[in-house]
Amino acid sequence: MFHWFIAAGFAVAWGVLVIVWVVGAFSTKSTARSASYASRLVLLAPLLIVWLLVNAHVISPSWLVIRPLPDNPAIQLLGLALTVLGCLFAVWARVTLGSNWSGLPTVRREHELITRGPYALARHPIYTGILLALAGSAIANGASGWMMAWLLVFVSYAVKIRQEEKLMMETFPQDYPAYRRRVKALIPGVF
């Protein structure tokens, strides 16, 4: 019964996130400008590697499925709680960003600088939420492949943040520097 509850919790948390993303993708503004295609490929290629890492058990048993963390209910509940919290934070950020959202570094036509809601806590709260959710999933799953996937997503987001920050500085040369000084990139008050 307990494992069913945990599995259902993860399915609902990640499922809600995916549904919000798919539905929201149909209501975005048109693109004004975006990062180069080469830089976009650099961001998309790690997704395949992440998929391979988290599905290592499907491909073949290896060191990627070793569990450095114990498999017990308390750790699974902690992982689920972090995943739910991360998914909710990412969904809140995605809904707040609205039609300005893009999966790749992009400036939309009539782009607005959003600084309210989760954007008052972190400049990239979607990434904060997804990283927290992935950390929760990695903790609950316990497999080293999940932990490596989290690290790869973090590095990919660091590259993406640099590209997005450059576009935002160019688009909002007066407002973005002040926002950047006031609000941390990923972890409120820290980083």
Image (tube, rainbow, N blue to C red):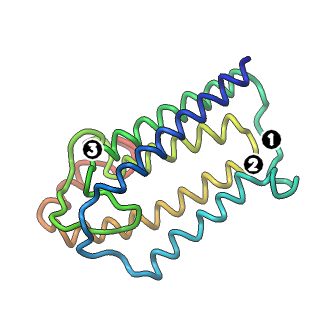
For disc 2, the marked residue is 144
Q: Nearer the viewer, residue 33 or 76?
A: 33
Q: Please indicate whether residue 190 sits to the left or right of residue 3 in the image.
A: left
Of the two numbered discs 3 and 1 in the rendering, the one whose residue sits closer to the viewer = 3
Quarter of the image where the N terminus is located = top right
Point 46% across, 74% down: residue: 40
For disc 3, the marked residue is 96
Give the residue type that dot 2 points to: Ser
Separation of marks 3 and 1 at Cα, in angstroms: 37 Å
Q: Who comes first in sequence, dot 1 or dot 2?
A: 1
For disc 1, the marked residue is 67
Q: Tag 2: Cα neighbours inside 10 Å, few (<14), some, or many (≥20)?
A: many
**Proximity of marks 1 and 2: CB atoms separated by less than 8 Å:** yes
Label 1 residue SS = loop
Give the residue type that dot 3 points to: Thr
Outermost residue toward the left in this view = 174
Point 31% across, 65% down: residue: 165
Label 3 residue SS = helix
Q: Nearer the viewer, residue 6 or 19?
A: 19
Point 66% across, 64% down: residue: 49
